[in-house]
Amino acid sequence: RGNGVLTTATGLVIVTDGRGYITAYDEKLNEVWSRYMGVGISAPAMTYGYNGKQYLAVLAGGAGTNGNNRQPELNNRSIQSLLMVFSL
């Protein structure tokens, strides 16, 4: 299940999902690269430029609730978000 799709000016198609994967495709939808973030991705990716360089940012973690019926010892775990940034 995808969280969102982002297309860059250079033709990359970036797809994120709640399982923790971020995948980049070229304009013909051939996979260019994929990365497992270790935690679920909470929002679509975004890009920005700084000093002539383009960056890709992804908000990961923070999804879900503290309740866990199958593993009650995890009910009080902390839920935190991370902003992960990659240079393109």
Image: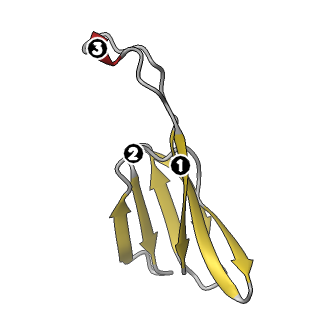
- Residue at x 45% of width, y 71% of height: 24
Looking at the rendered image, the disc whose residue lies closer to the viewer, 3 or 2, is: 3
The Cα–Cα distance between marks 2 and 1, rounded to whole angstroms, is 9 Å
Q: Is label 2 in contact with label 1 (beta carbons under 8 Å)?
A: yes
- Residue at x 43% of width, y 43% of height: 18
SS of the residue at dot 2? loop
- Between 39 and 5, the residue placed more toward the observer is 39
Q: Residues within 10 Å of mark 2 (few under 14, many from 20)?
A: some
Q: Residue 82 carries which label?
A: 1
Three-letter residue code for mark 3: Glu
Looking at the rendered image, the disc whose residue lies closer to the viewer, 2 or 1, is: 1
Say which label, 2 or 1, has the lower sequence index. 2
The Cα–Cα distance between marks 3 and 1, rounded to whole angstroms, is 23 Å
Say which label, 3 or 1, has the lower sequence index. 3
Image quadrant holding the N terminus, namely top left
SS of the residue at dot 1? strand
Q: Is label 3 in contact with label 2 (beta carbons under 8 Å)?
A: no
Residue tagged by mark 3? 73
Three-letter residue code for mark 1: Leu
Q: Residue 39 carries which label?
A: 2
Q: Residues within 10 Å of mark 1 (few under 14, many from 20)?
A: few
Image height of 84 relative to 65, above or below: below
- Between 85 and 13, the residue placed more toward the observer is 85
